[in-house]
Image (cartoon, coloured by chain):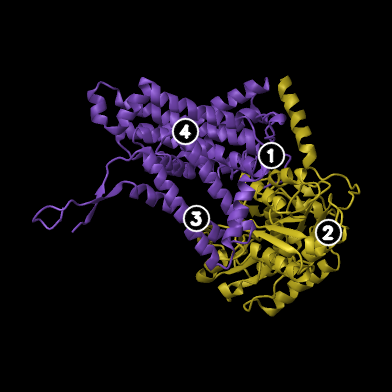
Amino acid sequence: MPFLKRRALLAGAAALPFLPRLARAASPLPAVAEKDAVIAFGHIGPVSDGGWSTTHHTGLLAAKKAYPAAKFLEVESIPVSADATRTFRQFVENGANMVFVSSEYGDLLSSVADDAPEVAFLECNGHHVSDNESWYYIQHWKVSYIIGVAAAKMSKSGKMGFVGSFPVPSVFGCANAFLLGARSVRPEATVQVILINSWFDPQAAAQAASALIQNGIDMIYTNLDDGSCLQVAAKAGIKCATWNTDMRAMGPDAYVTSLMLDWTQFYVDQIGARLAGRWAGDGHTLLPVGHGVDRDAWGRTVPPEVAAQADAVRTRIIGGWNPIQGEIRDATGKVRVPKGGSLDDIACYEWNWPVEGVVGLKAV
Amino acid sequence: MRGFVVQRVPSVSGRVRNAAYAVSALVAVFVAGLLLAALGLHPLALGGSVLKQSLGSRFGVQDLLLLASPLVMCGLSVSLMLRVGLWNIGADGQFYVGAACAAGVALFGPHGSPLLVQITMGLAAMAGGALWIAVPALARLLLGTSEIIATLLLNFVARLGLDWLVTGPWRDPHGMAAAQTARIPDPLPKLPRDWHLGGLHWGLAVVLGLAALLAAAFRFTRWGFELRICGANRDTAAYAGMNVRRRLFQAMLLGGAIAGLGGMLELSGTVHRLQSGLSNGYGYVGIIVAVLAASSPLGCVFTGLLMALVLNAGLVLQTQGVPSSAALALTGLILLFAAIGERLAHYRIVPTRPVAGAGGVA
């Protein structure tokens, strides 16, 4: 069928602008005096979520302190809809020189960025780059691997659960690395995944955690924005590891650890570069373990020898060891990474298939 | 001695109603100003920046019209059903289904001339919206099931179905973003550049044309007259020889089709991808649009713009440092006052005539 072929070509052509371009020196945006600077932050959830959005808000507060003369704009709970475009355009209308958004908005952001070439745009967990747009994220899979080591040691049954949002790479990467870490010390470990179609929906998160517990799971890991899973785990007397912030107060005996986020240095550096006229688009940053992302201090019920074993892995990772090593099979049993091979950071960032032992996720 | 009594008036003229809205809007803005002042912000400066950014710049006006378009479409859908005395709480679901059908045509249908593609998308969206409301419509007409509950519940089904499509079979194979399809290849064209409304698309003309068409149909056609009578009193309508069931069914299907078309315009004109957040509660706002407009199609255009202004004000306030919950509360406040004003317009204060020996009590 000729039109099918044509459509495949069209789809390929349409996709080109969204692929990261080959390294090409984008020229830096001109310097801005601190007293004239307007820095805007757009959050996906409420800054009071105690998790994801709170960490970005904390980064903003640090930046405010570092650049007291600059003006800061902040909008929370921006839905991934045409509302987002309007909000980002409001930022530009308000004279923003630099816009940070804490989640992937895709076209909703880049359409505004393309109309405002003098404004710097940074998209967390994004993929699109241009002369005035870059993305940034964290090497979360490495921390998930460390957490997996401890979790598998603490789980009684080896049947573990994961509560995530959408079938997107940051969920694949997180659940996969968690299982690979677990299997490195306990080869029969499994991870059952439930997705709730939202990053912030405490009620749905709690329901998902309860469903996992009813299925006999005694260890939950979640990368959702809030701490509802931990609360459910605490009530049920099982263990839970979370993301974003230190959430141990919600269930001190259930708390294993958390994938801790700290954007302060990154934000302060990026704003500093923009003010000094050194900021250029067309790039990306994946913050490494120990610089923006790390495990939290272990929970009080984590045995010291388990903590020591997981921390030994952490030390190796900080030393440059890549834990995502072959042989890795996907959930259908196909070898995806041969023995002796490994997945590099960009491959892990774009992970879109479940490894063997991760149940409930389908390859995209 | 003279006294006063409060009398209820069964129906009020459009002029009284509009005056009531104007007064309640002013009171609402005043109360909102007091609240902002209590939050430690400067209400006049904030009000100024809301007006300046919503109406004072080309971008602002464009954004306002873009936001108003889906609100008016959902408002028209709800209005049409209110005409026959039925509530369409499901405009949101019909909007989603319409958008999904249009996306299906755009992504997987044959490529023809752009105009033909748009028309096919529109027809598919209308069919989808109508089909989505057909179930509650049949349940209402054959079994007497409340259309309020049935249409509302189908919203969740539509939204979850759409989530499944965009995270599953229709997910953008080349993109990494969370939950969306590929970009549609032939979006709705923008308005001509020399009109200086570069961000706007032809969907706006469709919205306005449809509102005018419905207004004319209600006013000048026998069909519109019958709809009104069916809404006012079904027994009378049946007695007058009208086929009440058929009219109700037509109104519901058409209402669903209009909301579906709204979804297609939003997809093809504004967002260009099918995604979970396509309708950000537009169908629910559409109910407010229709009620404020007293189910008048042309009124919907104005109340749709008003709602867009109110929602946009919430965004502007947030960029100025008002917390999102406070901005939401302020928009709610304005609607609350409008509703109170509309109710109060039904009452008038009448001085009692002094009656000899009766003490002036009416």
Have a look at marks 3 and 1 and say if they share a chain: yes
The answer for how far apart the CA atoms under marks 2 and 4 are is 48 Å
N-terminal of the two: label 4 or label 3?
A: 3
Name chain A's colour.
yellow
Horizontal side of residue A124 vs B310, given as left or right: right
* Residue B1 position within the rendered picture, expressed as x and y whole percent measured from the top left: 18, 59
| 10 Å crowding of disc 3: few (<14), some (14-19), many (20+) | some
Considering depth in this image, is A153 or A317 the residue closer to the camera? A317
Gap between marks 2 and 1 measured at Cα: 38 Å
Given residues B299 and A248, the one toward you in this image is B299
Is the residue at mark 4 from the same chain as the one at mark 1?
A: yes
Q: Mark 3 or mark 1: name the one nearer the start of the chain.
A: 3
Q: Is there any visible trace of residue A87 in the rendered image?
A: yes
Provide the residue designation for mark 1: B172
* Mark 4 vs 1, N-terminal side: 1
Q: Do circles 2 and 1 both sit on a common chain?
A: no
Residue A341 percent coordinates (x, y):
84, 53
Q: Amino acid at mark 4?
A: Leu
Q: Residue A155 sits in which quadrant?
A: bottom right
CA separation, marks 3 and 2?
37 Å
**Which residue, given by chain and number where applicable, does mark 4 sit on?**
B298
Q: Are marks 4 and 1 in contact (CB under 8 Å)?
A: no
x 83%, y 59%: residue: A32
